[in-house]
Amino acid sequence: MAQDRIGVMLETVSRLHRKQSLPHLENLLGKTSETELIALFKAMRDEEGARILPLLPRVKAIRVLGALSTDQRAHLVSLAETREIMPILEDLPPDELNQLASRVDKPKQEQIQILLNMRRRPTNLIDDRMMGRSSENADGSVATPDDEYGTSPEKSVSSDRAPKNLEKAQMLFENIQTFHAKAANRTLQNIMGKAYPADLAAAFDMLPSDIVPELFLLIQENDQRARVLGELSETLQQTVVGACRIETLPPVVARMAPDKRTDLFSHLDKEMAEKIIAQLDQETKTEIENLMQYPPESAGGIMTSQFFALPEDTLVSEAIAAVRTLPTYEMVFYLYVTDESGRLTGVSSLRQLILANPRKPLREMMNTQVVHIHTHDHQEEVVEIVRHYRLLGIPVVDEMGVMVGLVTVDDIFPIFQDEVTEDMLKMAGAHSDEIEADSSLPIVRIRLPWLMLVFLGGIAGVGIYHYFEQEVLEMISMIYFLPVVTALAGNVGNQSATVVIRGLRTGEIKANAFWKVVLREVGAGFLMGILAGGLLGGTAYILFQKIDLVQVVATAAALTITLGSLIATTVPLILGRKGGDPTALTGPMLTTIIDVSGIASYFLIAHFFID
């Protein structure tokens, strides 16, 4: 009887499939029990089963496929369309995937291998680390940051390989590119739904910008969309927002962190920003307006308005209960305490809170020495304070001392990176705008002033040559050593300038330690100058056997290198002492000054010895 029923079902399924009555066929398959479906697919031709299996509900399809023999399963997978079968294979155990990979055709092998690689190195679990929570492994143990990324400290990436985050982004990029080309949208949804937002944003940066909005909209959860949108570059944010229907954006924007949301609106076209804000609830609108009133590079411009604070008279037991019911804020490592007017009066770590007497009010156990910043403090000051005090977060207060926000350490990292990049580019006579320039013309406009400075320095050098023409004619062989002397002086000067400027920036060198730093750097320059002078003098004697040439070259090398070190050390220190920017002494300017002064000192020494 059961066989007759399977036979009738087989005939019905085949007829509906031939007539392309897919809604009726899906309805019939959805109502059929798993046992009957397994018997049905065992009796069905593999060619037909490969086309019908993807029509099953996903859970049933996985169980049916798992119940088939290894040979039939492999044959069915080989015959099925890649974009239809891959979402079903995702949830098969790794051992079954390995068996399939050895039996299917090469294109399917490659796709199965991608799935296995994703299993070994998952793109992400959840971003609890950013919330100050640990993730749990399948066995209930707490996952470390390395565990979350499928690695352990013992299996860390060696120094000659790409950084782990870039490897993850590259792997995501390759997977997304592969499945997008095959229109495997269900697989893409699964990959992007599990991906860590920063990794997914980095992968989007590698993809053609015209397909990023399409991929972004494939992300099903608005929470994940919000986190990814907050991690995208300014250009990609504008591309994604511009391509989305206006009604799809408010639910996403509403779930973004307040500081990320503010950054987004500061990048968007004013008209587009107003359209999105108009569809948000009043509380979110007010929050956005409050944050956008501050300059972008101020503490108020980078803070989040989500923070955890309780009144002074709250009992410790009540505070602990409040922490347990806390919404998902950016960071809950510190409990801030305020008075009845909202003014910041104290802070407590969660550890102190848990160990305190439950019956005590917070005012009796809090730390009243609270490191804080003001809304209009520049972001560079915020970076320095956070770095100096080793804080995970720092409260922001207004002119009245009322706590209005919080700057967390993850907000500081991009600023610190930008400041370091800006300093490096300044010292090279370049600008951060050059990195994202679309053509050569903006780069030329930025670099041309420094080129003209070097040109003028070269003209000054020509003038010095002309002034000391008689000395040059009397000892023509000394010209051969001039490029070596100026190159050595420039190199030593650049080394001194780099050390001093970086030390001033990090606070390791204080501007008031002027003479200590000068004596140290100039002493090093002098010793290297003596060594270089001795080597050059010996070379001059071997080549020309002229004692007067040896005297000129050796003395000039020692003094010119010392002079280069002196200039490169004192100028940044003087600028730092006067409150200026030490990086104003850029590479081209420093090189020009040292070259011109080196040429002048070289010929002055030659003039002295010749006379």
Image (cartoon, rainbow, N blue to C red):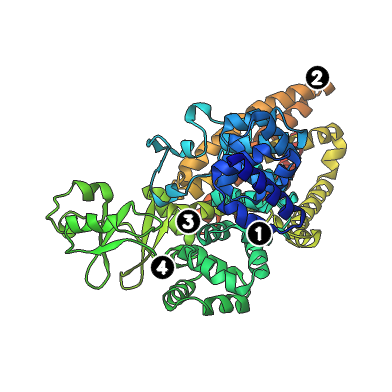
Locate residue 123, reporting x and y percent.
56, 43
Residue type at tag 4: Thr
Quarter of the image where one finds residue 241: bottom right
Quarter of the image where one finds residue 442: bottom right
- Residue where numbered disc 2 is placed: 542
Q: Nearer the viewer, residue 127 or 529?
A: 127
Nearer the observer, disc 3 or disc 2?
Answer: 3
Mark 3 / mark 1, whichever is N-terminal: 1
Determine the residue positioned at 42% across, 55% down.
408
CA distance for labels 2 and 1: 98 Å
Determine the residue positioned at 65% across, 64% down.
240
Nearer the observer, disc 3 or disc 1?
Answer: 1
Label 2 neighbour load within 10 Å: few <14, some 14-19, many 20+? few
CA distance for labels 4 and 1: 63 Å
Locate residue 601, reporting x and y percent.
70, 42
In the displayed structure, 374 sits above or below 168; it is: below
Mark 4 / mark 2, whichever is N-terminal: 4
Locate residue 575, reporting x and y percent.
54, 55
Q: Quadrant of the N terminus?
A: top right
CA distance for labels 3 and 4: 15 Å
- Residue where numbered disc 4 is placed: 375
Residue type at tag 2: Ile
Disc 3 to disc 2: CB gap under 8 Å: no
CA distance for labels 4 and 2: 68 Å
Residue type at tag 1: His
Mark 4 / mark 1, whichever is N-terminal: 1
Label 4 neighbour load within 10 Å: few <14, some 14-19, many 20+? many
